[in-house]
Image (spheres, rainbow, N blue to C red):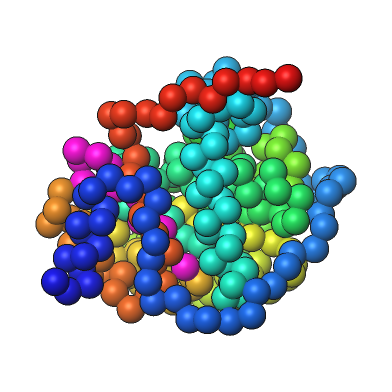
Amino acid sequence: MDKIEKAMKKALLGNAVSEGNNIPDSIESKAEQTAGIIYTQTRQHRINEEMLVQRRIVAHQQYSAEADVFKMLRTKILKKLRKNSWNNVAITSPMPGAGKSMVAVNLAIAMAMDVNQTVLLVDMDLKSPKVHWYFDLHVKKGLRDFILADLPLTDILVNPEFERLVVLPGRGETSESSSELLTGPKVQQMIEEIKNRYQSRIIIFDLPSILSSDDVLATLDYYDGLLLVLEEGGSQPDEIKKALQVLSGKNLLGTVLNKCANLPAKVQAYD
């Protein structure tokens, strides 16, 4: 059985998080303490707790089995990033509708709850950005405007009321060739800057789906590791196989099975 068939079998068996391969060894690094951040230039946005739950954003909740799933995912991803001295992970899916943006938002919140790092969540889906919707951000400027209108990032970044979390949202759909925009010199320079500016920052990139365009294929070299989100009953074996072929040779950290029919039992609160 080749690597693709093994990965397909592991994903289709329904593991919530499955271990990836092709990860080189390196010395584990520890992030700096980043508690008590005060945002002076970044716009702040007040969130609505009820709206977050309705949109399946739960990673910040206490005594929640659903939140614990994302905390477990956070810990697994952080261990792999630190082991390899990496600071970013990109999240994608074979086709639209698997819930990759929901996973990206929940993972970003879970990581920001750990005081050892700050988190930057970047919506790299120029054709169908979704991150702003999950936070109910009223976006007037997004990544597209940074690329095409020469706006500074400080005019676009938003803190959605979670300490240590900043969002670089998308806005609207672009009519330009998205892969050409994402591989242009301006985005390349931005990627290098945000990856190297802060030692304690973790960056999460919410990518388009792999098979819907060439955007993921064109930008794979930007990312340290990748996480593949699959939809139970929705992601087809041939789609998974094609997606894994695109990611072949890259650092696939694991897979997340979303929209599972059998959810974990509720975690009971305790004194």
In the depicted structure, whether residue 205 falls above or below residue 104? below
Judge by depth and name the residue closer to the eye, 195 or 238: 238
Instruction: Look at the magenta stretch and give its main secondary structure.
Output: strand
At 17% from the left and 74% from the top, the residue drawn is 2
At 61% from the left and 26% from the top, the residue drawn is 63
**Picture coordinates of residue 86 (x, y %)?**
59, 72
- Picture quarter with the N terminus: bottom left
At 37% from the left and 45% from the top, the residue drawn is 16
**Residue 262 falls in image quadrant:** top left
Q: Residue furthest front?
A: 271
**Residue 186 falls in image quadrant:** bottom right
Asked whether 103 falls inside the magenta stretch, the response is no
- Picture quarter with the C terminus: top right
Asked whether residue 53 appears in the rendered view, the answer is yes
**Picture coordinates of residue 232 (x, y %)?**
25, 39
Asked whether 226 falls inside the magenta stretch, the response is yes
Query: Magenta span covers which residues?
Result: 225-235
**Picture coordinates of residue 68 (x, y %)?**
54, 37
Q: How many marks?
A: 0
**Residue 128 falls in image quadrant:** top left
**Picture coordinates of residue 23 (x, y %)?**
45, 76
Judge by depth and name the residue closer to the eye, 147 or 157: 157
59 left or right, relative to 36: left
Judge by depth and name the residue closer to the eye, 117 or 215: 117
At 33% from the left and 78% from the top, the residue drawn is 249
In the depicted structure, whether residue 118 falls above or below residue 96? below
93 left or right, relative to 79: left
Asked whether residue 156 appears in the rendered view, the answer is no
